[in-house]
Image (tube, grey):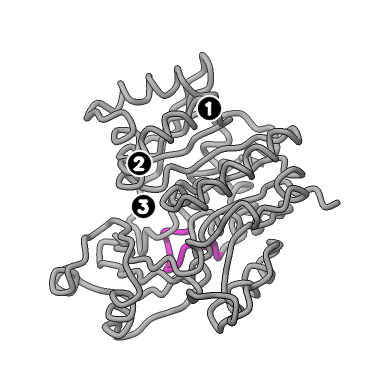
């Protein structure tokens, strides 16, 4: 049985990325800087409106696994694609990046929905506005979770967006149970403030049950329905094993038990902010997997995030280990 260092479960989404300006976003009714779930017809409209685009495998947790693959960890992804052109592209790209895609693409005749895709419009200031059609990812369920994969994970990383569908929630919980039963650590990314608003009660419960929770300042405020970030993080730290709060170019806060660490962030003008949180998670989880301290793990996350916002796309292009070495982290 393969023993994976990190297993992720999430939406398998092809990112379709193009530059835009605020006038275009206003004209198309796109809310800047957030992820919106859309239906198939809206997705086709936005896709047709793209003047030029690039295509990359995406999905928040899958992006994190790509970063971990860059760092040389053994990784696997639990997700769902259709055996169409985008689905085959996605599965092949994950494998080429060193991550085992454990669920074979679903034959076209057995799938009602196409492979998921997200139309991402990148503004001149680096903000990304994501319009996601979930497609077949929304069909992910507990039957898609191999116990021998989740149960063999040292670390399991879960995507909060899965809670948007009941079967996704069941798959999420099945994977977490299998991982923890096998002696691994399970955690979650809160995904975005609107996702938190939709599932606040469930996420508050998970905060107490999982081993770690990663979110940004907006998500933590939303979780505890307060404008005071300090109050939100203090409450979270009292309820969870390990919490991480990123703050868009400002210091990162990590807390576990009585230990609280603040990691400074070197301010960088982003080319494309897509994937910053995903790659922070990759660096942080790499540190966790290798027994590093909260401070070093947080700094690794910051280095990985800084690399990805320096170019288009949500996955690293540079050798992250080399960057860690340059920063005295390994």
Disc 3 crowd rating (10 Å Cα; few below 14, some 14-19, many 20+) is few
Res. 30 visible in picture: yes
Label number found at residue 88: none
Residue under pointer 1: 242
Give residue 221's quadrant in the image. top left
Instruction: Answer left or right for 33 relative to 178.
Output: left
Residue under pointer 2: 196
Tell me the SS state at disc 2. helix
Residue 108: x and y in percent read 58, 81
Instruction: Answer left or right for 25 relative to 193.
Output: left
Spatial separation of the CA atoms under disc 3 and disc 2: 28 Å
Tell me the SS state at disc 1. loop
Residue nearer the viewer, 323 or 145: 145
> Which span of residues is magenta-colored?
308-317
Residue under pointer 3: 268
Residue 117: x and y in percent read 44, 71
Q: Main secondary structure of the magenta part?
A: loop
Spatial separation of the CA atoms under disc 1 and disc 3: 27 Å
Tell me the SS state at disc 3. loop
Q: Please tell me whether mark 2 or mark 1 is closer to you in this view.
A: 2
Numbered disc total: 3
Task: Looking at the image, tell me whether mark 3 or mark 2 is earlier in sequence order.
Answer: 2
Q: Is residue 316 magenta?
A: yes
Residue nearer the viewer, 138 or 273: 138
Residue at horizontal 53%, vertical 79%?
86
Disc 2 crowd rating (10 Å Cα; few below 14, some 14-19, many 20+) is many
Q: Please tell me whether mark 1 or mark 3 is closer to you in this view.
A: 1
Task: Looking at the image, tell me whether mark 1 or mark 3 is earlier in sequence order.
Answer: 1
Instruction: Answer left or right for 61 relative to 225.
Output: right
């Amino acid at each position: 049985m393969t023993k994976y260092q990190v297993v992720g479960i999430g939406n398998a989404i092809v990112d379709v990325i193009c530059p835009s300006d605020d006038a275009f976003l206003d004209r198309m009714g796109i809310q800047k800087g957030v992820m919106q779930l859309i239906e198939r017809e809206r997705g086709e409209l936005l896709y047709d409106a793209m003047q030029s685009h690039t295509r990359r495998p995406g999905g928040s947790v899958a992006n994190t696994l790509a970063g971990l693959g860059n760092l040389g960890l053994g990784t696997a992804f639990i997700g769902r694609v259709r055996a169409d052109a985008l689905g085959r592209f996605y599965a092949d790209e994950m494998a080429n990046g060193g991550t085992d895609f454990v669920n074979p693409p679903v034959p076209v005749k057995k799938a009602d929905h196409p492979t998921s895709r997200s139309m991402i419009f990148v503004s001149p200031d680096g903000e990304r506005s994501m319009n996601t059609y979930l497609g077949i990812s929304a069909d992910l369920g507990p039957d898609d979770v191999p116990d021998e994969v989740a149960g063999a994970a040292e670390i399991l990383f879960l995507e909060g967006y899965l809670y948007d569908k009941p079967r996704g929630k069941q798959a999420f919980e099945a994977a977490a149970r299998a991982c923890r039963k096998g002696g691994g650590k399970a955690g979650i990314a809160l995904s975005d403030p609107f996702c938190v608003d939709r599932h606040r009660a469930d996420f508050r419960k998970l905060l107490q049950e999982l081993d770690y929770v990663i979110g940004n300042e907006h998500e933590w405020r939303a979780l505890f329905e307060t404008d005071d970030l300090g109050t939100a993080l203090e409450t979270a730290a009292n309820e969870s094993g390990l919490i991480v709060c990123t703050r868009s170019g400002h210091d990162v806060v990590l807390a576990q038990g009585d230990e609280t660490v603040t990691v400074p962030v070197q301010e960088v003008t982003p080319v494309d902010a897509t994937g910053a949180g995903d790659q922070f998670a990759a660096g942080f989880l790499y540190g966790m997997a290798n027994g590093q301290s909260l401070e070093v793990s947080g700094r690794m996350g910051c280095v990985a995030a800084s690399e990805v916002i320096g170019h288009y796309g949500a996955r690293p292009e540079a050798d992250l280990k080399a960057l860690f070495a340059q920063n005295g982290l390994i």
